Amino acid sequence: MVRTPYCDKSGLRKGTWTPEEDRKLTAYVTRYGCWNWRQLPKYAGLARCGKSCRLRWLNYLRPNIKRGNYSKEEEETIIRLHGSLGNRWSAIAAQLPGRTDNEIKNHWHTHLKKRFMDKQNNSEKAVEKKEKKLNNHHHLVIDVPTSPPLILESSLSASPQPTSSDQNSTITKDNTVVSSKDSVTYDHNNNNKASLEGYGANSGNFWNEPFFWDSCNINTSVTLDPASYELPDFPFLDGEISCHFDSYDPLDGFYF
DNA sequence: AACCGGAGCAACCGCCACGTA
DNA sequence: CTACGTGGCGGTTGCTCCGGT
């Protein structure tokens, strides 16, 4: 389930996060915020790259994360949004409070995708069945009055009938051509055309909000007592450390 | 009991967008 | 205008678990 920890060439740890690392990261972010992910691990006492810290915090350590136990409503929402948005997991996650894009992505690939494909296959089969029925009917109607007899297959190209690229098309009673693709409930071809207005504004940027121990209810698997954990000094309050940030304006870039 | 393959999922990687100097 | 740094996102990987044989 989890990766074996190891170090890369630069000495940064990779792989599974240990409870100790989780404690350090949680303690640091809750106390100082995420002023700079790339610099953060250095001051949080973590031998991790910033990206790894960010991912760990966003997906597992931040407060009010929901883990597993997807409700039917949530699953339906995911399927519906995936139908209109495609693989825009962050946009989908924005509509599901407490869910992360990574978790939704995983849940989609492991559970919902199959269900979605089955649904799609069933609807396609239904359309095929309908087509077959209609095509048989078509044969009977056209074969009778024409003289000399027409071979329907070859006649398709010479007539305003659907071309070979429309093999999945259906001719309805009133002679209109309906592609079976159009009858699929979820239109992947329109993924990029879907209106995304509102998603950006709705994403609820967690990082723009102040964040303190006192103001949040930490809901994480890591039990952390801030009083018992010795945090590294905050870089801008410590003369020795803050020298790394000579060009950094301490009045900017903070979230608190 | 041992082996094997698929499922589940945490984490990494690479690319892109955006802001700033 | 360009270069660079950073954050964000989606695709993919690879480790562990678990059920079937």
Image (spheres, coloured by chain):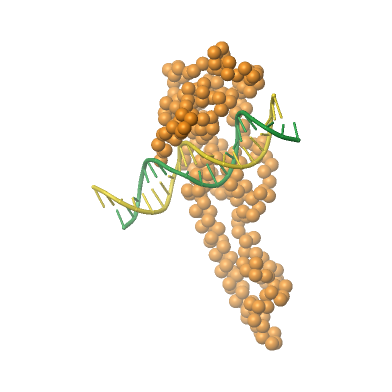
Chain colours: A orange, B yellow, C green
Q: Quadrant of the N terminus of chain A?
A: top left
Q: Residue at x 42, y 28 (%)?
A: A19
Q: Is residue A34 visible?
A: no
Q: Residue at x 54, y 13 (%)?
A: A240
Q: How many marks?
A: 0
Q: Residue at x 60, y 28 (%)?
A: A207
- Image-quadrant location for residue A253: top right
Q: Looking at the image, is A224 positioned above or below residue A167?
A: above
As rendered, which of A227 and A137 lies closer to the eye? A227
Q: Quadrant of the C terminus of chain A?
A: top right
As rendered, which of A200 and C9 lies closer to the eye? C9
Whole-percent x and y of residue A170?
64, 69
- Image-quadrant location for residue A131: bottom right
- Image-quadrant location for residue A203: top right
Q: Looking at the image, is A97 positioned above or below residue A134?
A: above
Q: Is residue A256 visible?
A: yes
**Side (left or right) of B2 relative to A22:** left
Whole-percent x and y of residue A132?
58, 72
Whole-percent x and y of residue A119?
53, 57
Q: Looking at the image, is A142 positioned above or below residue A5?
A: below
As rendered, which of A81 and A71 lies closer to the eye? A81
Whole-percent x and y of residue A228?
43, 17
Q: Residue at x 57, y 67 (%)?
A: A128
